[in-house]
Image (spheres, rainbow, N blue to C red):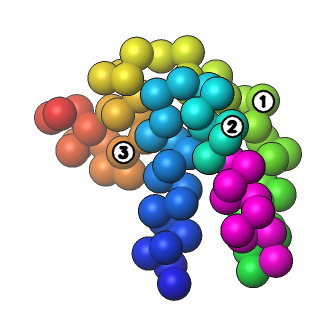
Amino acid sequence: MIQKIIREMKEIYRANTIEQAEIALESFEKKGSKKHPAMVRSWKTNWEGLSIFYNYHPDIKSIMYTTNSIEGFNR
């Protein structure tokens, strides 16, 4: 179950454009709003700040979204 949620969230932050990310966010909201309302609410509430992320080149974004800073640095 957690793996499914992670895959859906990856669709948001791995999107190449803000438009693709917004579509993925809407999909995530439709699928997860009943089971995970706090997660959906957090993404929606913080979208203005999170969406700045899409102003960066994809190579830079991949470094930024890694959970392991050393791994990101070595990429």
Mark 3 residue type = Thr
* Cα separation between marks 3 and 1: 20 Å
Q: Is residue 48 above or below residue 43?
A: above
State the mark number for residue 38. Answer: none
Query: Considering the image in quadrants, where does the C terminus appear?
Result: top left
Q: Is 42 displayed left or right of 23 in the figure?
A: right
Q: Are marks 3 and 2 in contact (CB under 8 Å)?
A: no
Whether residue 38 appears in magenta in the rendering, the answer is: no
Residue placed at 72% from the left, 30% from the top? 49
Q: Position of residue 56 (x, y in %)?
A: 47, 16
Q: Are marks 1 and 2 in contact (CB under 8 Å)?
A: no
Mark 3: few, some, or many residues within 10 Å (few <14, many ≥20)? Answer: few
Residue placed at 31% from the left, 42% from the top? 69
Mark 1: few, some, or many residues within 10 Å (few <14, many ≥20)? Answer: few
Looking at the rendered structure, the secondary structure element under dot 1 is: helix
Mark 1 residue type = Glu
- For disc 3, the marked residue is 66
Question: Which quadrant of the figure has residue 29?
Answer: bottom right
Q: Position of residue 47 (x, y in %)?
A: 75, 37
- For disc 2, the marked residue is 22
- For disc 1, the marked residue is 48
Mark 2 residue type = Glu
Q: Mark 1 or mark 2: which comes first in sequence?
A: 2
* Cα separation between marks 1 and 2: 11 Å
The stretch of residues the image draws in magenta is 25-34
Q: Is residue 37 above or below residue 71?
A: below
Question: Which quadrant of the figure has residue 64?
Answer: top left
Q: Position of residue 51 (x, y in %)?
A: 66, 29
Looking at the rendered structure, the secondary structure element under dot 3 is: loop
